[in-house]
Image: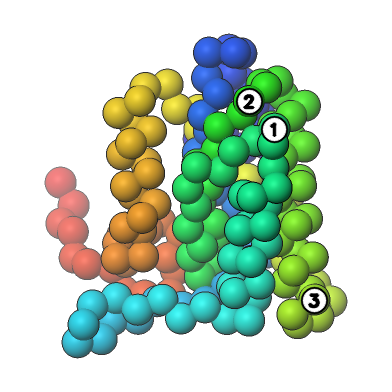
Amino acid sequence: MNTNKTNSPWPAHRVQFITLCTHEKQTTLGRIYKDKNGFVWQPTVWGMAAEEGLRKLKLSSQLVLIQDYVIMPNHVHLLVLYRRCNDRVVKWFISHCKHTMAQHMLKAQNANEPIWETSYSSHYVQREHTQLALSQNIREHKTRWHYDSLNTFLPRPYSPKV
């Protein structure tokens, strides 16, 4: 795991998997519950606003392409492709992404405390099959919320210690 550091041999690794957590990992973006039909995502006002911000960012960004993303109760996963790679671009994109979502969120519902954690997690994707697996994981992530290490609110399935 890489926190706020972008140690990547440029330009070979242009795809990055990023996780942005909400302030103190609070579930300010929504909740996931299970009903008779499966898992249901119920976004909050902020969750819907973050979605709108990411959609606009995805359409407008020329330098960084957002390939996939998922909004979870207390974090956002992004799979991005950099058209031009260097540490400055990566740091700019993370900041721009948080700022864009925050603008939409605060327009929907004002708040006096921070929205995002200062740190973030990022991994450079080195192989195409890893990129495809991460993309699939993003699409199915809400159905696997109970396994997510950032899920601090739902009971986890039993897994014996070995």
Given residues 76 and 65, the one toward you in this image is 65
Q: Residues within 10 Å of mark 3 (few under 14, many from 20)?
A: few
Question: Does residue 60 sit above or below 3 in this rendering?
Answer: below
Q: Amino acid at mark 1?
A: Leu
From the image, tell me which residue sits under label 2. 83
Left or right, 115 with respect to 121, comes to right
Mark yes or no: residue 80 visible. Answer: yes
Assess whether mark 3 and mark 1 are in contact (beta carbons under 8 angstroms): no
**Sequence order check: which comes first, mark 1 or mark 2?**
1
**Separation of disc 1 and disc 2 at Cα?**
5 Å
Q: Nearer the viewer, residue 56 or 9?
A: 56
Q: Amino acid at mark 3?
A: Lys
Left/right placement of residue 133 relative to residue 95 reads left
Q: Which residue is mark 1?
A: 63
Q: Residue at x 38, y 44 (%)?
A: 135
Q: Position of residue 99 (x, y in %)?
A: 78, 55
Counting labels gives 3
Q: Secondary structure at mark 3?
A: helix
